[in-house]
Image: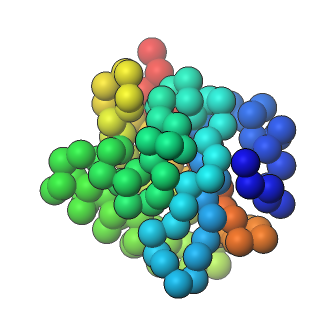
Amino acid sequence: METFSIPLDYLNTVPWGTIVVKMDSLDLNHKIVYVNNRFMDEIGYSTEEIPDKDTWWRIAYPDESYRLVVTRLWELAVQETQEKQAQFVSVDAIIQTKMRGQLKYRVMADTKEYYQGGYYAVQFMRLDRA
């Protein structure tokens, strides 16, 4: 397992799924290097199943038309966050989980601490709890 500046012990205590992604300035298909316990419990994919950003997008959003919509929403949210110099970017989306079908999540990232030592975290807060 890689070592990062993001505290993994802490990530396993947060109440939402989290992935840690390694940034590569030469490749926009960033490598997913860690998923926390909550992500595994709720969404169900391991780093072997979603080794990179492109694979994640294809699995999480299997319908190509919907994937394009979510991609564009994320890009617009990032742009707006940067323009407003806000700290967090988020988009609500329906994600295809491994074992639980499609569930609605708020997907979030911290733009101020986005690249900590070459890594960033993306969080998934479930919205459709009964």
Q: Nearer the viewer, residue 61 or 80?
A: 61
Q: Nearer the viewer, residue 18 or 22?
A: 22
Residue at point 18%, 48% (across, down): 63
- Quick one: which residue is furthest to the top in this view? 130
Q: Where residue 50 sits in the image (x, y, percent)?
A: 45, 47
Q: Where residue 97 sits in the image (x, y, percent)?
A: 38, 32
Quadrant, the C terminus: top left
Q: Nearer the viewer, residue 32 or 94?
A: 32
Figure quadrant of residue 38: top right
Residue at point 44%, 41% (across, down): 49
Q: Where residue 3 sits in the image (x, y, percent)?
A: 80, 56
Vertical order, 62 against 100 (above or below): below
Q: Is residue 115 left or right of residue 128?
A: right
Residue at point 79%, 44% (across, down): 8
Figure quadrant of residue 77: bottom left
Q: How many marks?
A: 0
Please say whether residue 88 is visible from this viewpoint.
Answer: no
Q: Is residue 64 left or right of residue 83?
A: left
Vertical order, 94 against 31 (above or below): above
Q: Where residue 56 sits in the image (x, y, percent)?
A: 41, 51
Please say whether residue 86 is visible from this viewpoint.
Answer: yes
Q: What colour-coding does the image apply?
A: rainbow
Q: Is residue 21 left or right of residue 45?
A: right
Vertical order, 60 against 28 (above or below): above
Q: Nearer the viewer, residue 63 or 73?
A: 63
Residue at point 31%, 25% (across, down): 101
